[in-house]
């Protein structure tokens, strides 16, 4: 980053309203932080049309075989890893569908990795290693919108004709100008000057959750408000799966449990098997053949 641009960026981070922060009592500290956090949702609300447009465009790419690549450094990268990691168990998708690239790799999840966020080459190498193409989506995440690692990823994605999306939290930025789509709420300066794990991190978490949940819903991975493709990997989730099947099919929990046991506790398959009176093998075939059909669409296809 050029020195004058960096100086301007750092100046923009200064919060003149909290210069007495270290002098406050514990209750005053948490009250002030809470008050600041309450402004984040309104900042994100102003960007809902941009977020909705991104959902539509991302869904189109995934329906044609594309993948999502989140790219970020520091807090932004860690939040990207968190959101991508939740997609397979929540929506039953492959771990390769939504991937996170964090500057510094897995080591950076637990501790800071020096200077890596300034490496443009590292971002490009990661995208190349994952064979990103024009079918895919590259989503760059950075509070300032100037992080070299993330900027380079967007530029490389644009060169490949991948769909590029920027998520920044201090308004429009360099990344906004590069990307095809820009999501740019301005959450204002942090209570603790420059600590973007606070309001900016909260905004990023909200936006990523909106994007992934909405895209997966448009891909048919949600029925009404139920996670019909949830991976029931523990007892709590098995009970949840039983509740889903019981509610959709109008059967007892015992009957739902029996159905689920026949399909390795996959709610969608249990529902299809019950409603369409099909074998396990036929249900497997349907879900493989129509991976991005909603449950209603799958039921309609075989009720004709």
Image (cartoon, helix red, strand yellow):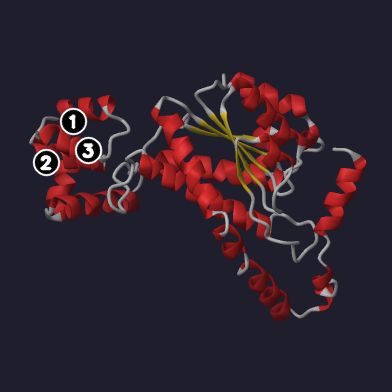
> Image height check: is 172 above or below 18?
above
Instruction: Sort mark 3 into few (<14), some (14-19) or many (20+) by Cα contacts within 10 Å.
Output: few
Mark-to-mark CA distance, 2 and 3: 16 Å
Q: Position of residue 28 (x, y in %)?
A: 72, 80
Could you say which is closer to the camera, residue 101 or residue 190? Answer: 190
Sequence-first disc among 2 and 3: 2
Q: Position of residue 299 (x, y in %)?
A: 16, 38
Could you say which is closer to the camera, residue 298 or residue 176? Answer: 176
| Residue at x-position 57% and y-position 22% | 130
Q: Name the residue tied to disc 3.
A: 297
Q: Name the residue tied to disc 2.
A: 274
Instruction: Sort mark 1 into few (<14), some (14-19) or many (20+) by Cα contacts within 10 Å.
Output: many
The reply, left or right, for residue 12 in relation to residue 249 is: right
Nearest to viewer (mark 3 / mark 1): 3
Q: Position of residue 279 (x, y in %)?
A: 11, 30
Circle 3 SS class: helix
Q: Is there CB contact under 8 Å for labels 2 and 1?
A: no
Instruction: Sort mark 2 into few (<14), some (14-19) or many (20+) by Cα contacts within 10 Å.
Output: some
The C terminus, quarter of image: top left
Q: Is residue 261 visible?
A: no
> Image height check: is 38 above or below 87?
below
Q: Report the disc number at residue 283.
A: 1
The quadrant holding residue 116 is top right
> Image height check: is 155 above or below 87?
above
Sequence-first disc among 2 and 1: 2
Sequence-first disc among 3 and 1: 1
The N terminus, quarter of image: top right
The reply, left or right, for residue 172 in relation to residue 163 is: right
Q: Is there CB contact under 8 Å for labels 3 and 1?
A: no
The reply, left or right, for residue 45 in relation to residue 299 is: right
């Amino acid at each position: 980053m050029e020195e004058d641009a960096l100086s301007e960026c750092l100046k923009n981070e200064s919060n003149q309203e909290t210069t007495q922060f270290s002098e406050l009592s514990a209750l005053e500290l948490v009250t002030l932080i809470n008050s600041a956090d309450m402004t984040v949702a309104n900042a994100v609300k102003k960007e809902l049309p941009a977020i909705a447009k991104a959902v539509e465009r991302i869904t189109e790419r995934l329906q044609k075989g594309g993948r999502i690549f989140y790219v970020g450094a520091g807090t932004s990268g860690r939040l990207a890893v968190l959101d991508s990691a939740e997609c397979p168990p929540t929506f039953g998708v492959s771990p390769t569908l939504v991937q996170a690239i964090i500057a510094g790799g897995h080591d950076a999840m637990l501790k800071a990795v020096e200077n890596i966020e300034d490496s443009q080459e590292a971002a490009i190498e990661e995208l190349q290693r994952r064979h990103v193409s024009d079918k895919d989506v590259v989503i760059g995440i950075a509070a300032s919108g100037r992080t070299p690692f993330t900027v380079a990823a967007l530029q490389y994605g644009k060169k490949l004709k991948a769909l590029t999306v920027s998520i920044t939290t201090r308004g429009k930025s360099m990344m906004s100008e590069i990307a095809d789509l820009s999501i740019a709420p301005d959450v204002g300066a942090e209570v603790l000057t420059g600590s973007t794990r606070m309001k900016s991190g909260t905004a990023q978490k909200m936006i990523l959750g909106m994007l992934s949940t909405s895209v997966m819903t448009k891909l048919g991975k949600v029925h009404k408000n139920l996670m019909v493709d949830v991976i029931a990997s523990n007892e709590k989730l098995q009970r949840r799966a039983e509740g889903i099947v019981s509610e959709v099919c109008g059967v007892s929990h015992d009957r739902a449990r029996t159905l689920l046991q026949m399909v390795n506790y996959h709610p969608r398959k249990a529902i299809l098997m019950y409603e369409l009176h099909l074998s396990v093998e036929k249900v497997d075939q349907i879900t493989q053949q129509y991976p991005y059909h909603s449950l209603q669409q799958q039921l309609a296809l075989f009720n004709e």
